[in-house]
Amino acid sequence: MLSVASFPAPRSGFRAPQTLLRQALLALAVLSAVLLAAPRPAPAHPHVFMDNLTTFVFDGQGLAGFRLSWLFDDMFGTTIIQDYDRDGDGQFSPGELAVLKAEVFDYLRHSDWFTFVWIDGAARRTVQVDDFSARISAGRLIYEFYVPCPVPAGAGERRVLLSVHDPEYYADVYSPEDKAPELENAGAFEVRTSVALNPERTYSPFEAWLPEIHLTFRRR
């Protein structure tokens, strides 16, 4: 289970200074859009900022899936905490978590949970996520969830490309290039990973560079 300390230090200039009122209005606008499933303004620009960490999970056949951990910016996280930690005890009870999942997290299915995958160059849609949890660590909001993505090891190398991003760029998702993805149960495989922005592939009207998390593996 990750805490705030598991994430790297914020990027330089990661969050531009704003007045408290403007931050609150932006966060509330985001929450309203999520809860009401309202169309997003176009072109969008980031109102929510998230750090993403990835753990690739293997089994005896090959890649089983991956776990994503998201740390949210202070203002959006505080808004969610105030609205869904209804007893104010600093943690989400099972009942509070169920409401948060139903009213906020499940809305992301319309955007494939910001999770886009290519296997050996072929796109694979994200249609299921499991084991969603949300918790409060040092006053910050963290989501964690698991994405089943079975890729059996073959005679040669298998290539997986994962990109975690909001196609409309309403949320800015940062996968740190200097922090390698974690691996679980990977001892039977030769594995290489890398994280980088690809300036040759862009998304959103702002032509943001595509964040790419690469995994290659084969049996030892």
Image: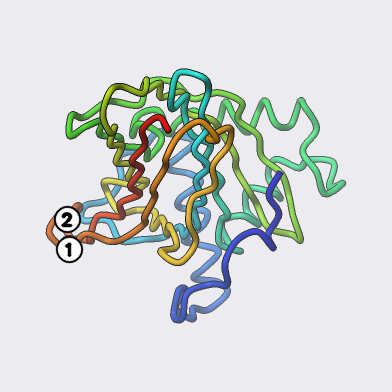
Asked whether, in this view, residue 111 is left or right of residue 220, the answer is left
**9 in relation to 133, above or below:** below
Dividing the picture into quadrants, the one containing residue 206 is: bottom left
Point 68% across, 59% down: residue: 4
Q: Nearer the viewer, residue 37 or 211?
A: 211
Asked whether, in this view, residue 4 is left or right of residue 61, the answer is right
Q: Nearer the viewer, residue 167 or 102?
A: 167
Q: Is residue 47 visible?
A: yes
**What label does residue 199 carry, if any?**
1
State if disc 2 and disc 1 touch (CB < 8 Å).
yes
Amino acid type at mark 2: Thr
Q: Position of residue 192 (x, y in %)?
A: 39, 48
Q: Which residue is mark 2?
A: 202
* Circle 1 crowding by C-alpha within 10 Å: few under 14, some 14–19, many from 20: few
Q: Quadrant of the N terminus?
A: top right
Q: Quadrant of the C terminus?
A: top left
Q: Position of residue 112 (x, y in %)?
A: 35, 31
Asked whether, in this view, residue 98 is left or right of residue 35, the answer is right
Q: Is residue 104 visible?
A: no
Q: Disc 1 to disc 2, how far (Cα)?
A: 7 Å
Amino acid type at mark 1: Pro
Residue at the far left: name it.
Answer: 200
Point 29% across, 32% down: residue: 158
Q: Position of residue 195 (x, y in %)?
A: 36, 57
Q: Secondary structure at mark 1?
A: strand
Which numbered disc, 1 or 2, marks the residue closer to the eye? 1
Q: Secondary structure at mark 2?
A: strand
**18 in relation to 147, above or below:** below
**113 in relation to 31, above or below:** above
